[in-house]
Image (cartoon, rainbow, N blue to C red):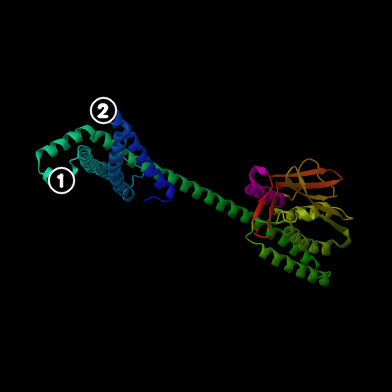
């Protein structure tokens, strides 16, 4: 009937409060001048017994409501009217049965008070017109009020069901949104992988006839890179140490291409190696820096990769000393920087930033800011730093 213990407490607590309320009402209407404490205690016992009758009948009503719930009433739907009629009929019968039970309880306590309880024969009383006239009078006095109580019980139960459905749909919507974001992020990540793979294969193809040994070494480095990429497939976030390891494998290929024309500086403090970052976040930025910074210069150049904390955020920077750009990002930034922006937005919303800064003739700086969080080495859980 109820899904957790708290709902049982609410159910019985509400009936207990109603018993106390009815007791105070009966005590205020009582005209006999006897001991106040004995009157209170006797009336409380009587009301508790009567409320127990209603509470037990309430279980039957709730069973009907659970078996035939009202979900989205429609005026033109016959089933909606049938279920509604069933609930009204069940409430009507429960009210009749409840009043009959409480009438018997009232007679029993009245006889206890007069000391004639043990002389009472219930079966003989049921055969007398006086008993049924009393029950008829009892119905006239209390039917409408108790009928509303039964309807209110059904209404409260359906409110709980509606709230439960609403919360369940909220959770399902959040799960669907999360799954969609993960799928979208994975699609963007998979779009990046063929991008750098094709660029690398083009470089290998250009070296096959010119320098077969170097092409062979590049193929071996590419195999290492692809194995590491497969190991991280499906992961939305990795540690900064894992991302740096993947970047090193990629740079091993680029160093073969550019030889002495390319120098790399990676500055990642030890205390930041457990920071969580989006997988595959540094490689496209470094690739753009190599292509448009180092590759655009006849003498080559230097690329610096840095990580630091700034105002409670993790700051990642990729800087080259190439020609930079004047008014807009250099051509060819579509896939790398575009996907990076979209993935950061999907993963962190407004809690991130990505910017490209350039001073013509002095190079370009790509800067990413992320929420600072750490991966626990014991449990693998993320520890968020406020």
Answer with left or right where residue 217 lies relative to residue 149. right
Q: Residues within 10 Å of mark 2 (few under 14, many from 20)?
A: few
Q: Quadrant of residue 137?
A: top left
Is 354 a magenta residue? no
Q: Label 1, secondary structure: give it.
A: helix
Q: Residue at x 68, y 56 (%)?
A: 375
Give the labeled residue for mark 2: 33
Q: Main secondary structure of the magenta part?
A: helix
Question: Which of the labelled discs sits on residue 301, or is there none?
Answer: none
Q: Position of residue 232 (x, y in %)?
A: 67, 62
Quadrant location of the C terminus in the rendered image: top right
Give the labeled residue for mark 1: 122
Nearer to me, 291 or 368: 368
Task: Determine the CA span between mark 1 and mark 2.
Answer: 29 Å
Nearer to me, 207 or 107: 107
Looking at the image, tell me whether mark 1 or mark 2 is earlier in sequence order. Answer: 2
Is 338 a magenta residue? yes
Of badges 1 and 2, the one in the foreground is: 2
Q: Quadrant of residue 381?
A: bottom right
Q: Is residue 208 visible?
A: no
Q: Residue at x 83, y 53 (%)?
A: 303
Q: Quadrant of residue 110?
A: top left
Q: Which residues are magenta?
A: 334-351
Q: Is residue 104 visible?
A: yes
Nearer to me, 177 or 340: 177
């Amino acid at each position: 009937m109820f899904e957790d213990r708290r709902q049982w407490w609410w159910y019985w607590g509400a009936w207990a409060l109603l018993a106390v309320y009815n007791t105070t009402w009966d005590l205020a209407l009582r005209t006999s001048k006897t001991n106040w404490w004995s009157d209170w205690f006797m009336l409380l016992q009587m009301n508790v017994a009567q409320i127990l009758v209603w509470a037990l009948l309430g279980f039957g009503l709730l069973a009907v409501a659970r078996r035939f719930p009202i979900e989205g009433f429609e005026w033109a739907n016959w089933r909606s009217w049938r279920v509604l009629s069933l609930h009204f009929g069940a409430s009507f019968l429960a009210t009749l049965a409840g009043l009959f039970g409480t009438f018997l309880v009232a007679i029993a306590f009245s006889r206890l008070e007069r000391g004639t309880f043990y002389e009472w024969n219930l079966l003989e009383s049921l055969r007398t017109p006086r008993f049924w006239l009393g029950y008829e009078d009892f119905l006239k006095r209390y039917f409408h009020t108790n009928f509303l109580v039964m309807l209110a019980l059904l209404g409260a139960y359906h409110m709980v069901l509606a709230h439960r459905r609403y919360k369940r749909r909220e959770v399902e919507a959040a799960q669907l949104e999360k799954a969609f974001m993960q799928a979208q992020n994975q699609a963007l990540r998979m779009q990046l992988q063929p991008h750098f793979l094709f660029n690398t294969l083009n470089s290998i193809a250009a070296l096959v006839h010119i320098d077969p040994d170097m092409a062979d070494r590049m193929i071996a480095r590419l195999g290492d890179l692809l194995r590491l990429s497969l190991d991280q497939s499906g992961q939305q976030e990795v540690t900064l140490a894992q991302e740096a390891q993947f970047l090193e494998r990629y740079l091993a290929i680029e160093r073969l291409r550019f030889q002495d024309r390319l120098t790399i500086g990676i500055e990642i403090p030890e205390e930041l190696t457990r920071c969580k970052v989006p997988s595959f976040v540094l490689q496209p930025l470094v690739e753009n820096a190599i292509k448009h910074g180092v590759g655009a210069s006849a003498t080559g150049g230097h690329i610096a990769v840095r990580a630091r904390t700034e105002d409670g955020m993790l700051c990642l920077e990729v800087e080259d000393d190439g020609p930079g750009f004047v008014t807009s990002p250099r051509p060819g930034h579509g896939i790398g920087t575009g996907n990076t922006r979209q993935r950061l937005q999907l993963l962190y919303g407004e809690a991130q930033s990505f910017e490209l800064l350039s001073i013509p003739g002095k190079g370009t700086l790509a800067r990413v800011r992320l929420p600072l969080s750490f991966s626990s080495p014991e449990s693998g859980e993320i520890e968020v730093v406020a």
